[in-house]
Amino acid sequence: MDRHDVTEKGFSGFLVLWFAVFILFLLTGCTAHVTKNISEKLDQDALYKSFSVKLEDLSSRSKCNAPPTVKIVNIENRVEDYETLQNPPATGVINPKEMMDSVCLYLKNGFEKNSIKSDDQSSKVIQVKMEDLKSVAGVWTFGSYFKLELIIPETKFTKFYEAKDNSAHGYAAPAYAIHSVTRQIIEDPAIQDYILCR
């Protein structure tokens, strides 16, 4: 056997091995933790500008005795991996509690941009927990869906808020849907009436 035959057989063996590894990867896929990736896309200034959010001084309509405040509480307690991103063969998972920590921060900052301060001592308490967060890869974009449950313990008010959005970037799509849900909450007359004592 000459040197050329040995080189050719070695190269063929390498190709077979590479192909086998590739097929195994396709069959098993891989899982990535994407909580931090999605949270980093929750850039308040960038998203508010991108979505042309019109800010309003909600405090000017308050009938409370003191400047209006709100306490946002994350009551999501799931910490196990939650599948959120489907981009075969890859899968993205989040920690629901940590994801909702980021959503709560985004919501708090949203209220503050509308002149309602976030205060852990406030008597106006709003609890939130994640119902679902899913993103699926399409041909050119990722479609995302976010749903949360909001509870006001004082009045027993409960409501689900949800939104769908898409983006060419897998982590931006859920951030867009989260943004939309937080704006629905801030703009909801029932929530404003509660916080503003009306």
Image (spheres, helix red, strand yellow):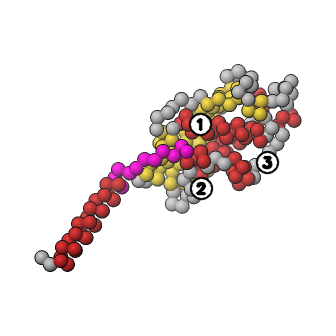
- Residue at 73 percent of width and 24 percent of height: 121
Q: Quadrant of residue 126?
A: top right
Residue placed under numbered mark 2 in the picture? 167
Q: Quadrant of residue 179?
A: top right
Q: Position of residue 123 (x, y in %)?
A: 74, 23
Residues at circles 1 and 3 in contact by the CB criterion of under 8 Å: no
Residue 32 magenta-highlighted: yes
Q: Earlier in the sequence, mark 1 or mark 3?
A: 3
Residue placed furthest toward the left? 1
Residue placed under numbered mark 3 in the picture? 54
Residue 188: assigned label: none
**Which amino acid lies under the numbered mark 1 shown in the image of this protein?**
Met
**Which amino acid lies under the numbered mark 2 shown in the image of this protein?**
Ser
Measure the C-alpha gap from mark 1 to mark 3: 24 Å
Magenta region: 26-36
Q: Is the residue marked by circle 1 packed among few (<14), some (14-19), or many (20+) residues within 10 Å?
A: many
Residue placed furthest toward the front? 3
- SS for callout 1: helix
Residue placed under numbered mark 1 in the picture? 100
